[in-house]
Image: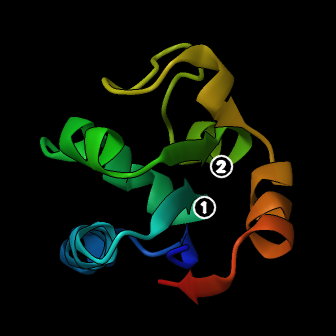
Amino acid sequence: MAKSLGIFVTNPDNWRHVMGIVKAAKAKGSKVKVFFTWAGTKNAKNPDFPELCKLADDVSICVDSYQKMGFDRNDIPVGLDAKKMATQAQHGAILEDYDCYLSL
């Protein structure tokens, strides 16, 4: 079985890296989860965000951080549903359930 990769995104400037890594990991057969927190939640407004949601196996956002970055918590980014507007427990799930961990 392919390894799994959890990506923890805190920096809004790493979008190209996130997309590139997700594409490469999926091409190798890996399961990929991406969790956006703090300023990394600004990536949810990238026009390619819905594409990332289709590529990765799981994408979620820290709703508290999203709100602190000035977004309305009810403004759910295209590609996500309300349950993916989550808490830091998603970060814990990456640490517990994924073979590899990357912070960007």
Look at the numbered disc 2 and give the secondary structure of its residue.
helix
Q: Are marks 1 and 2 in contact (CB under 8 Å)?
A: yes
Name above or below for residue 83 compared with residue 91.
Answer: above
* Residue at the (56%, 13%) spot, across then down: 74
Apparent side of residue 5 relative to residue 50 in the rendered image (left or right): right
* Residue beneath disc 2: 65
Q: Nearer the viewer, residue 25 or 17?
A: 25
Of residue 96 and residue 48, the one placed in the foreground of this image is 96
Disc number placed over residue 38 in the picture, else none: 1
x, y percent for residue 100: 63, 86
Residue in view at x 55 percent, y 79 percent: 3
Q: Quadrant of residue 85?
A: top right
Q: Which class describes the residues within 10 Å of circle 2: few (<14), some (14-19), or many (20+)? A: many
**Which residue appears at 34% of the width and 40% of the height?**
53
* Amino acid tagged 1: Trp
- Scheme of image coloration: rainbow
Kind of element beneath mark 1: helix
Question: Is the residue 64 above or below the residue 89 in the image?
Answer: above
The earlier-in-sequence mark between 1 and 2 is 1
Q: Is residue 17 above or below residue 35?
A: below
Snapshot quadrant of residue 13: bottom left
Residue 7 point in image, percent of width and height: 53, 72
Amino acid beneath label 2: Ser
Give above or below for 67 relative to 20: above
